[in-house]
Image: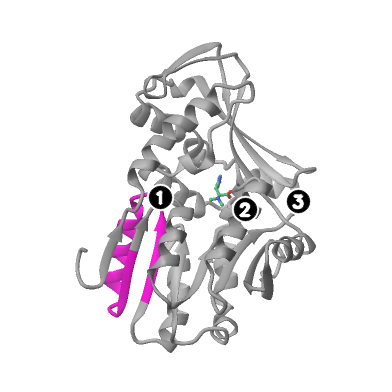
Amino acid sequence: MIDRNLQYFKPHSYKIEKTFADEIYSSLNSNSKNIHSKYFYDKKGSELFEQICDLPEYYPTRTEIEILKNLKSDLSKYLNDSFRLVELGSGSSIKTRLILDIFAENQNKIEYFPIDISEILAESSELLQRDYQDLNITGIIDTYEGGLEFIEKYDDKNNLIIFLGSSFGNFIPNEGKNFLRKINSIMKNDDLFLIGLDLVKDKKILEDAYDDSQGITAKFNLNVLSRINDELDADFVLKNFEHFAKYNEKDQRVEMYLRSLVNQSVNVSKANLSLKLKQGELIHTEHSHKYKIPQIKELFNKTGFEIKQIWLDKNKHFALILVSKK
Ligand code: AVI
C-alpha cells in the first residue's frame, strides 16, 4: 500500500523467475530455437516498446487511439457506475486515459486495476494518479493469467477488461484461444471485454511497421538478449546478431527473428545451457497475427463470447471489439 489510492500486489513473484530460466532452457535447447515474446518487456524493453508506438511506420498505436477518441458515447452506453476498469498490460497511458475519461463521465470515484509483468506499471500508475484525483489504483505485478485469477477472487464489482494494442496477436492461435477462454471463465455475466486487434493489410505496410528506418524495433528485439545476459548470467554478444522481420501471408502474421551473423557459442549459466549457433541461424522471437473481420467473429463465437460492437478506423487497418459472455 503506497497511499489510500494506490496499492500493488505481486501474487506470484517466485514462479515468474523460475519460469524464465526453465523456458529459456527448453526454447533455446531445440532445433527451432525461440525466445517467447513475453520476455521482451523488462524495464528497457518496455521503454523501447513505448518508442516503437510513436514511430511513423508503426501505425497500430495511433490508429487505435483514433478509434478510441471516436468511441466515447458508443462505449459509455454499455457502462454504469458499478464498473471498474481492468487493463491487461499497463499500456500506453494515452489509451488508458481515453477510457478513464469515459468512466469519469459516470463515476466520481474510479477504480483501475492494471495487470502487468513489468514493474513499469508502478511508474505509469503514479503518473496517472497525479492527473486523476479520484482514481483508486490497484496494480497487479504478475502474468495476465495470474492477475486475472486475482481479480476473479477480489470482489463482486463489474469489470470492463481491456486488452489493447493487438497484444493478443502475439499469442499463437491455440494459446490465444485458451487465453480467451480463461478471460471468459473469470468474467461475471455482466462484465465486458474490449480488445484491439490488428487487421490484414498490404505486406509493405506490415513489414515497414516491424522494421523501422530508425532501428528502434531492432533494438527492441536485441534487448531480449541483454535481458538474458543480465538476469540469467549469459554471454550473448549483441553485435553477433541482427534483427529480421517478414510477413507470412499464409499464416497472416509478421514474424520476428534474431539472426546469428557468425558461428558462435553462448553460455546461459542460470539456465544450465551451452548453446551453439551457426552463421545465418534464426532465433524466433515474435509472431504478430493479423485478422480478417469474419475470422474475428468466428474466434469470439468459438470461445464463448457474444460480440456487442466492432469499431474500425477509416482505413480499416485496426479493430476494437466489445464482447460479453454468451
Ligand atoms: C505488443 N505487440 C502488440 C507488438 C506487436 O505489434 O506485435 C509488439 C511489437 N513487436 C515489434 N513491434 C511491436
Nearest to viewer (mark 1 / mark 2): 2
Q: State which quadrant residue 226 falls in.
A: top left
In the rendered structure, are the residues bearing label 3 and label 2 in contact, judged by CB atoms less than 8 Å apart? no
State which tag comes first along the sequence, 3 or 1. Answer: 1
At mark 2, the secondary structure is helix
From the Cβ of disc 3, is ligand 1 less than 8 Å away?
no
Q: Can you tell which of label 3 and label 1 is closer to the viewer?
A: 1
Residue at 70% x, 45% y is 253
Report which residue position mark 2 lands on. Answer: 178
Q: Where is residue 139 in the image (x, y as percent from the top left)?
A: 34, 62
Residue type (three-letter) at the residue carrying disc 3: Asp
Q: Percent position (x, y) of residue 99?
A: 47, 74
What's drawn in magenta, residue-wise?
111-138
For the residues marked 3 and 1, what is the alpha-carbon distance in whole angstroms?
33 Å
Tag 3's secondary structure? loop
Identify residue type, mark 2.
Answer: Asn
Residue beneath the point at 33% across and 50% down = 119
CA separation in Å, label 1 and label 2: 19 Å
Q: In the drawing, what numbered circle is on residue 117?
A: 1
Q: Mark 3 points at which residue?
A: 202
Q: Tell me where residue 13 appears, x and y as whole percent.
A: 33, 46
